[in-house]
Structures are given as C-alpha cells and as structure tokens.
Amino acid sequence: SAAEKGGYASFMLKEIAEQPKAVADTLLGRIDASGSLTLDEVRISAAELREMDKVVIVACGTAFHAGLIAKYAIEHWTRIPCEVELASEFRYRDPILDQQTLVIAISQSGETMDTLMALRHAREQGSKVLAICNTNGSTIPRESDAVLYTHAGPEVAVASTKAFLTQLVACYLVALYLGQVRGTKWGDEIRAVIRDLARIGDAVEQVLGTMEPVRELARSLAAQDTVLFLGRHVGYPVALEGALKLKELAYMHAEGFAAGELKHGPIALIEEGLPVVVVVPSPRGRSVLHDKIVSNIQEIRARGARTIVIAEEDDEAVVPYADHLVRIPATPTLLQPLVATVPLQVFACELATARGNEVDQPRNLAKSVTVE
Ligand code: G6P
C-alpha cells in the first residue's frame, strides 16, 4: 500500500532513501568508545580466528558483488588470502576447505538455496561458517557457526539496495575485526578506517541529495539497448552491480567490465553514442589506478562512447572526457563502493520507470530463490 511505501512511489525508492540509516544501524553498538570493534555476537573465538589461513566468501547476485568488494578489504587489511565464489558454482568443483578456512556466507534473506547448500558443504569439510545476513532467525544464520546481522530493516523490493550497502559495512567490519584480533601491521590504518566508516552515512546522504541530474540522464537513455559499466579495483564490482541493477529493473543489455580488460575485447563493442558508465577511483591514494582509468575514458570517448563518469568531487582530470559527470564525496578507496553504488541504483530505478517497468517486482525474478 501507499502508506507502507512511506510516500515513495516504490519500495525501491524508499529503500534507496533509507540507506544512510541502514548503514548507521549496522555500525551501531559495534564500535566502542576507544574506537575498537566489539563483535561479541561473532561466536568464533579470537584464538580460532587467529588460526585461519584462508577466507572463502560464497553468495549470489548482489550479495556476491558485496563479497567481491570484501576481498579487496580483507586481503589488504589482514593479509589473509581470500577467494570469492558464486554459491551455485562452489560445491560442485570440490573446493579445498579445512578447519583453518573461514567461510563467509552473505545473504539478505538467509534463505537462498544455493548459498545454504554451499555453507552446508563447507561445514561438512570442517570449516567454520560466518553468516552475514539481514533476516533474524532465517535458515542460513541458523545453520552457520556465527552470524553478523546487517541492520537494513526489511527489504521488500526484489532488487537489493540498502541490504547491499549494509552487507558492505558488515564485510568491512569483519575484515577490520580479523585485522584487530590478529594484530596486523595495519593497526593505525584500521583505526582510521573505523573513524571513516562512522562518517560514511553522511556521505551517502550527500549523494542522495544530488541525484536529480542522474534521474534526468536516465530518462534520456530510456530508448537505448545497451549500457556498459567500467571500473577498476573495488570499482569493478561496483560496475558489475550497476549492470546487474539495469538488467534486473530495466531489462536492458548491461555489462560490467574491469577497465583494464577493455583492450582485451570489450573495446570492440564501443560505437557511436553507446552509453558507458565509468566508476573512477580516488585521485588521491592509489593515483596509478586513477591515471589508468582516465586514459580508458579517453580511449572509449575517442571511439564514440557517451561517457557517464562517476568521480570524486575534487577530481578535475576527468572533466574534459566526461559527457555527464556525477560527483561523489571523497572517501578512502576501499570504502568508495558505499557511495559510488548509490547513483547506479537511482539510475537503474529511474530508467526502469521511464521504460514503464514495475520496479519493485521485475519480471521473472524472486526476492529470495529457495530452489537450486
Ligand atoms: C535473488 C534476488 C537478488 C539477490 C539474490 C541473493 O536473486 O533477486 O536481489 O541479490 O537473490 O539473495 P540473498 O537473499 O541470498 O542475498
């Protein structure tokens, strides 16, 4: 009903708007006064966590994209090797698992059959499973050794938005916590990131306040057949998520690529007028990455692409090559997905609406897929 949608035209729009609160709620009570993490609910002991020599993340759909981003954070902050795999592929390839493998199963609903079967397989091999889940008492957390709940609140729209942002927050918390209990040499960086995380909800709010040009742009692209998405580093999974949203909601051909792969194939797809969304990493920090993506934008634009560039507010280098520029607040590189994803959600939602699609209930999809 209209009342349930709180005045928004769809649950999806309502859930997009709720993201700052969802992020804040997921952090609530998990950072103590000294700036350390207290994840008492993660009932895997610090001693056990210190023994882990590998992390394996399993998930499906949007939750899988959260896992892809988590890999960058976990490996950087903890130096523990991390693999990410689609839950539906995982157990069929005889994966290497033992007691020193921490398996993280990410699921909004907690009922996705592929993810459940993957975690059952992991536990049979003696691995410990930590669930990151949004639904209290659902099957995946019940069958796991421990759970870290995301506090996004109920997500009704089939396409995941606020749950995704909270999955990212939970993944960062787990990564930082692993670093904390293992006493990695990144101690100072860990404390700085925890402070940055505590402020990130404001950055998300700021992005939400500047989305009108993105909506306008989306409406102008309603007759397109294809949109491509490019990113590097954590921007690559963000590109995949932007493309998934467009498939789910607008029923358009959309693909995400690692920008460095362009020259190995995808650049052949570029033709006059093709919209290409590029997620640009911060010009500070890993500036090599930034320079490389700026030349990627130049390359595709020279071949006729209509470039839609998502870049930090102080990034001047991209301006000459952006047909459309979407500004996001500056964040540490690893946290950028929390702000960079938001314009892509708004873009997909508006494009779908302009094409006359029902955004909360896309055709052929289910909120939770309880069959394999
Ligand atoms: C379905 C939904 C997706 C979701 C995926 C995983 O395919 O349509 O939006 O990302 O399942 O769901 P889960 O509940 O496990 O996060």
Image (tube, grey):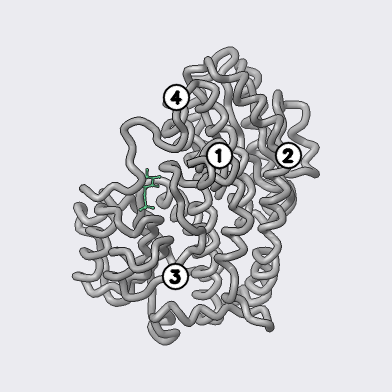
Residue 352: tell me if it is visible. Answer: yes
Q: Is residue 186 left or right of residue 139?
A: right
Q: Is mark 4 within 8 Å of ligand 1?
A: no
- The disc, 1 or 4, on the residue closer to the chain's N-terminal end is 4
Residue farthest to the bottom?
47
Q: Which residue is mark 3?
A: 148
Q: Which residue is mark 1?
A: 345
Quarter of the view holding residue 230: top right
Percent coordinates x, y for residue 207 in the rendering: 70, 45
The disc labelled 1 sits on which kind of residue? Answer: Gln
Question: Which residue appears at 63% of the width and 77% of the height?
Answer: 187
- The disc, 2 or 1, on the residue closer to the chain's N-terminal end is 2
Q: Which residue is mark 2?
A: 210
- The disc, 3 or 2, on the residue closer to the chain's N-terminal end is 3
Between residue 123 and residue 144, name the one nearer to us.
Answer: 144
The disc labelled 3 sits on which kind of residue? Answer: Leu
Percent coordinates x, y for residue 372 in the rendering: 21, 48
Q: Is residue 2 left or right of residue 91?
A: right
The disc labelled 4 sits on which kind of residue? Answer: Met
Question: Which residue appears at 62% of the width and 31% of the height?
Answer: 296
Q: Which residue is mark 4?
A: 252
Mark 4, secondary structure of its residue: loop
Mark 2, secondary structure of its residue: loop
Residue density around tag 3, few if under 14, some if 14–19, many if 20 or more, within 10 Å: many
Mark 1, secondary structure of its residue: helix
